[in-house]
Structure formats: C-alpha cells, structure tokens
Amino acid sequence: MTDKKIKELLFYCKELKKENLVALGDCLSIRDGDGMYVTNPDKEIGEVTESDISRLGFAQVPANRMPALHRQLYLARPDVNAIITNHAPYCVAAAKHLNSMVAVLDDMAQIIGPSIKFAPSYEPKTIVKFIGKSNACIVKNGGVVAVGRTPDEAYTGSMVLEKGAKAYIEGTILGGAVKIPFLEALLMRVIYKNKYSKADQKAKQEELEI
Amino acid sequence: MMTEKEIRQALKDAGIRLLEKGLTQGTWGNLSIRLDERHMVVTPSGLDYTRLTPDDMVVVDIETLEYNSHVKPTSEKKIHAAIYRERKDINAVIHSHPLNSSSVAAARKSLPVMSEEMRRLVGGEARLARYGLPSTDSLTKSTIKALEGRNACLQANHGLVVCAGSMDEAFEVCRVMEESARLYIESEVKKILKKDDIVAEDIIEAFCNIINK
C-alpha cells in the first residue's frame, strides 16, 4: 500500500508540472493512518522522486513548514485524505488582484462551491477556518490549498479552480464574467458531492485503502 | 456502419483522447455515437475516462431515454438524444469543457467566426445557449435552438457541445472551436492593451486595466 500511495503522489506531481500549475515550495500529501506521506517542499514538484517523499507521523511534523498546514487540515477534516498546496498562474493572479471570486462555471460550482474564500495567510489555523467544509481556498498574495477524499479529487479541485480563475479573468476581458446564481451553484455542489462523484471517489479510496 | 462493439471501443478511445487533448478534466464531459435510427451509445455518468471500459458504455433509446444496463448513462443524455432526433446527419456528439471555450461561455458571449476553417466546420458564429442547470429540459431546448444550422454551440457558464457525422469530425470541430475561442480572447486583449502582439502575461495586464479603471 505504501508503494501505491507514493506512486500516486509521484503521478500527481508530474501532472501538476505538466499543466504548469506549480512553483517552488509547493507540496502534495496523502493521509496514512496517524500520519501522512508528503513531498519535500524544497524540491521543485516536477523533480520530485521517491526519495523526496517522507512519511511523517502527525506528532513529528515540523511546526514552521508547509507540512504543518497539511497536518492541521488532516486533523481538522477526517474526510480529507489528500492535500495539494500549489501555485497555478490564474489563481496566483486572482490571489494578487482580487479579494473574492465567484463561480462563473458549472464545474467550479460543483467541485468548489458558489465562491472561493481568500485566506489572509498560510497560517494553519487560519487555513482550516477559511477552507471550512469546502475543498479549496486561495491564499491572498499566495496560491491554492486544495483538499479531497483522494489525490484525484484534490488535483481536480486545483485544476478546476485554475480553470474557474481563468474564466473569471478572461470573461472580464470579454465584457464581464457572469456569476452562476447562488442557489443554483449550491444545489450543484450538493449533488456533485453526495451523488455524482460518490461511486468514483469510493472506488479510488478503496484502491488506496484510505 | 459501426457495430455496437466497435462503437463501445470508439467511445472509450475518444474519452481518453478528450483528456489527452486537454478538452476536459476529470469525469467531466460526455460523448456519444449513433448506433442506429432509434439508439445511441453514450458514456456513463460520473466515471473517470481512464477507468472506463467499453462495457461501461450504455445503449440508450433516443426517443424514450430508456436503457438496459447496471451502469447509469451520462446525465446529459437528453441533449445527445435531442440532437440525434433533430439532426439525421449527425452520428457523433461531444459535450466538453475546454478552457478557452469555457472562458467565452463564462462571459455569456457567442463565439464570432474567427477563421474560414471555423466557418466551414461550425457553419458560422457559434451561438450561446442560455443558462440552465445541467440535465434540465431548459438547457436541452436552448442547446438545440443554438445548434440550428451549426455544428457547435456554447452553453452559458458551462461549456461546449459539438456534433458531426463522425467522432473524428466532431474532434475537429472541438479543436477549431477551442482555437477560435483563444483567438477571440487574444483579440480583446490586443484591443484593451492597444498592442499587435501579446504574450501570456498580457492577459493578466488587460484584466488589471479593467478592474483598476
């Protein structure tokens, strides 16, 4: 199982790099019992190899590093089994120039919700508070924190948030991005989480025994 | 005429192609191929394309939407069926969410003709289907209306629907739509920045110009 989890992390490191959604300091992790497998944030995501992935028990995570944020999220959210902290270009632009961003695409409404919250810093307790029960948040003047039931769901969340930011920014350029009505966005989120994605995510969780 | 077995495999291959070409993410988007006058074969609901097998594809009655399978067909089957009912020349449908087309859809704009290739493959401007929740009759009706005389349309805040005589042709329509959407966005950035040539970073600069006005 260890092998599977490490391979899964390596796979998504490569996917994030391929999609140009990363910068130095980014970090991926997957829950493993009372700890997590986590990539070394000092290693560029595209260069991460098996030796750059460590298993850290929750009691032994250094307090001042990005893995501390991952630890705090796992402890606060038993439903979360994978976390990605990354820097995707349109999200970074949104983090720099906006204070809020609503869903202007159905897939963002489904995976993220009617809007994305902007946390003021990467401080772990702050992120836990701002991410709440959702799957992601943007960090003001920073990047993205995306969580999921599986690495696939965290990765898809990060991808969809980048797509939502791109659509928001480019839609504004085309004359104005139009937000999805709040109640309809909320309805789509509930249906996605409880119905649409359930079988797919359950199968992926079982494969990884998480 | 393709057999059901060939169609099932063709859909599996097309799903992978959709992901590889960056025309959708995760479990999003759905595909279908006409089986005969009364039936279509569609991709299932909510499953990752990399995990699908040909057996997961679902034969659906175009008139009644009935199916006989333990796997649920795509929740957008109504749109696929309506296209096959309305357009006898159509044998393949792709509903996807490519990045640039989605940006235009988020602005609730039609996509103007950006090239002769787009005019030839799409049939003219790609209209915008008005906003509706996924899987609803309302979205189906507005999509069919937007597709009149066209091989593609955008769906407000949602994505792209294309149709063609074959799956290969449908992919060509998808490609030209996505390229045209990119050209459309870039043309607006050039206007805002009053530049003839732009680089990727100029998109953010144009955005900042607008929000800081």
Image: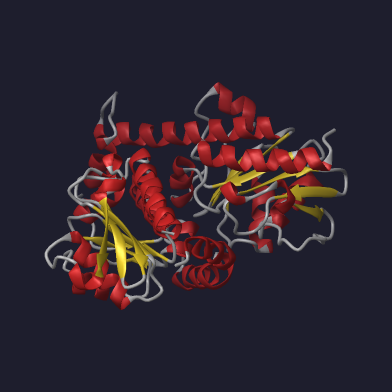
Return the x and y of residue A41 as percentages of the image width and height.
20, 52
Confirm whether residue B197 shows in the render: yes
Is A132 located above or below residue A172 in the figure?
below
Is B153 located above or below residue B132 in the figure?
above
Q: Does residue B97 appear to the left or right of B42 in the view shown?
A: left
Quadrant housing residue B75: bottom right
Return the x and y of residue A110 as percentages of the image width and height.
48, 64
Image quarter of the N terminus of chain A: bottom left
Is A137 located above or below residue B84 in the figure?
below
Q: Does residue A206 appear to the left or right of A66 in the view shown?
A: right
Q: Does residue B17 appear to the left or right of B12 in the view shown?
A: left
Image quarter of the C terminus of chain A: bottom left
Return the x and y of residue B196 as percentages of the image width and height.
29, 23
Confirm whether residue A171 shows in the render: no
Taking depth in this image into account, of B115 and B98 the one nearest to the observer is: B98
Taking depth in this image into account, of A189 and B83 the one nearest to the observer is: A189
Return the x and y of residue A42 as percentages of the image width and height.
17, 48
Identity of the residue furthest to the right in this view: B37
Determine the residue positioned at 25% across, 76% down: A129
Determine the residue positioned at 80% across, 59% down: B65
